[in-house]
Amino acid sequence: MPYDLIVIGSGPGGYFCAIRAAQLGMKVAVVEKDKTFGGTCLNIGCIPSKALLHASELYEESGHLFDKMGIKVGQPKVDLAAMMKFKDEGVDGNVKGVAFLFRKNKIDTFQGAGRIAAPGKVEVKTADGKTETIEAKAIVIATGSDVARLPGIDIDERRIVSSTGALVLDKVPQRLLVIGAGVIGLELGSVWRRLGSQVTVVEFLDRILPGIDNEVCRQFQRLMEKQGITFKLSSKVTAVDAADGKLKARIEPAAGGAAETLDADVVLVSVGRVPFTQGLGLEEVGVKKDNKGRVVVDGHYATSVPGIYAIGDVIAGPMLAHKAEDEGVAVAELLAGQAGHVNYDAIPNVVYTHPELAAVGLSEDDCRERGLQVRVGVFPFAANARARGMGDIEGEVKVIADAASDRVLGIHILGPHASDMIAEAALAMEFAASAEDIGRSVHAHPTLAEALKEAALATDGRPLNL
Ligand code: FAD
Ligand code: NAI
């Protein structure tokens, strides 16, 4: 019997889409080429990286902070195999959870690589070479992304690794060279630095984390340097020589000039991700892609071919799990005749280091570029009672509000638990809050969230604890 919807890919985009469509009464099939469901995020992305960030952060705290708090545990030791097992258990629980949700929502699953043979027709090729064709009124492409590679630097996932290999190293590298000061470089660089590696991050641009508020990033970089990470900005790695059992990276100034060589035990290539559409048959069926290989969609996620839709990392926009999830829900609702919608102006972005960095909306640089008149309020965690009590006072909250209307345009948080605090900021922006609205909302005391209220008041020059 034909389906109402076939979703290709079971990452956060695909599995949210399938579940929402099933909730709305559609008969749904999901095609997944990998052994487990959950895509990049659950298997080799968000979940394993956050498990290692959590474990390595506690390891570092137990070595440095516990003693100060009067907790005597002796010198902690890393059992890397056990830490990896802890991470794998977290992944396992999550991927099994997706399988459970598919069963609960009566979603049929097909294990194998999907190829769109024609609109409404998906051919599934299983690992044993068998092919089965399934049919549906609509197809959603949710095939995600893959690691971006650098010419001449071959990833073997042992010594020259992508994030996938960096999540399964079997020993702590003495020297880790990270190419790219983006989210992966900083998160996984932090993990291995905490576990004992000397970490050098080489970044092409003259700043880290492009796209995030520059002033906040400069503070963030200083904190990362204080923790022991070395940055080489405005530089590029042009080759890695892997002969003789040693890795020798050739580093050149981005603008050209004399090269230097840096020895490393492991090189992490983290220079971005690219959309994954291999084997999908898009060219044959006529689905258009842009010059970056992303599937082109309209405001309703429809591709250039009627009946074929696309969401998540495979289309334009930030490559984030929650963006993919919300697009999955939106397209399912649109297919059911509802008004599915994603507000791209209020998508939070988080770097899960310590301190965490979280942002939603415009940065000060964005506002300047758009010629917007703004008022900026900053409140440091050093003046927040809870942060003081926790001994975790680095960072600040920055609120950017429109000078005339007071509407919040952006919120940036560098500090402890910023990933949780940003939810309030995103909600405020979703409801088009003014800084005054946040400043007048009662915030429990003592909480870190009071720093957001104070930063909102600071846009009007009236923080109470500064
Ligand atoms: P994916 O999760 O990539 O899923 C696509 C799925 O489609 C895969 O399972 C793939 O096997 C399958 N597939 C592809 N082609 C076919 C085919 N032809 N047939 C059948 N199946 C197919 N984002 C965050 O928001 N927060 C984080 O903390 C975070 N951490 C990350 C850490 C790392 C190390 C990495 C690499 C990424 C991280 N991301 C994070 C990004 C996040 O993982 C992605 O944005 C998200 O997974 C995209 O979801 P998706 O559903 O579009 O695609
Ligand atoms: P990224 O796009 O965040 O950063 C890549 C960095 O590499 C940029 O700073 C870029 O300027 C630099 N770069 C590019 N080419 C270079 C070169 N030749 N030499 C030196 N530097 C170079 O990409 P990253 O870190 O690989 O992450 C990929 C995606 O995964 C991101 O889009 C991110 O959204 C997602 N992700 C999200 C996480 C989160 O939300 N916490 C965690 C990890 C990944």
Image: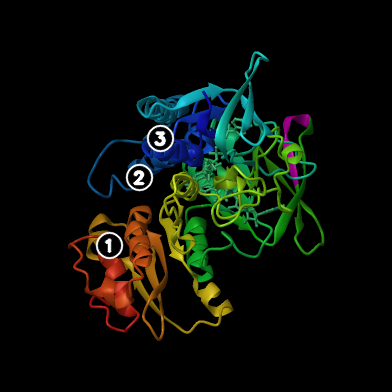
Looking at the image, residue 136 lies above or below residue 402: above
Looking at the image, residue 57 lies above or below residue 441: above
Q: Indicate the amino acid at tag 2.
A: Glu
Residue 321 appears left or right of 90: right
The answer to whether mark 3 is within 8 Å of ligand 1 is: no
Residue shown at 54% from the left, 74% from the top: 365
Classify mark 1: residues with Cα within 10 Å, few (<14), some (14-19) or many (20+).
many
Where is mark 3, residue-wise?
22
Q: Residue 249 falls in which quadrant of the image?
A: top right
SS under mark 2 = helix
Q: Nearer the viewer, residue 336 or 77?
A: 336
Q: Nearer the viewer, residue 246 or 181?
A: 181
In the rendered picture of this protein, how many numbered marks are placed on residues? Answer: 3
**Callout in the foreground (3, 1):** 3
Asked if residue 436 shows in the view, the reply is: yes
Residue 324 appears left or right of 282: left
Q: Indicate the amino acid at tag 3.
A: Ala
Expressed as whole percent of the image width and height from the top left, the position of residue 427 reads 34, 61
Q: Which residues are magenta?
A: 244-249
Q: Indicate the amino acid at tag 1.
A: Ala
Give yes or no for contact between labels 3 and 2 (Cβ–Cβ under 8 Å). Answer: no
- Say whether residue 247 is magenta: yes
Where is mark 2, residue-wise?
61
SS under mark 1 = loop
Q: Earlier in the sequence, mark 3 or mark 1?
A: 3
Q: Residue 318 falls in which quadrant of the image?
A: bottom right
Looking at the image, residue 348 lies above or below residue 330: below
Where is mark 1, residue-wise?
449
Residue shown at 26% from the left, 62% from the top: 388
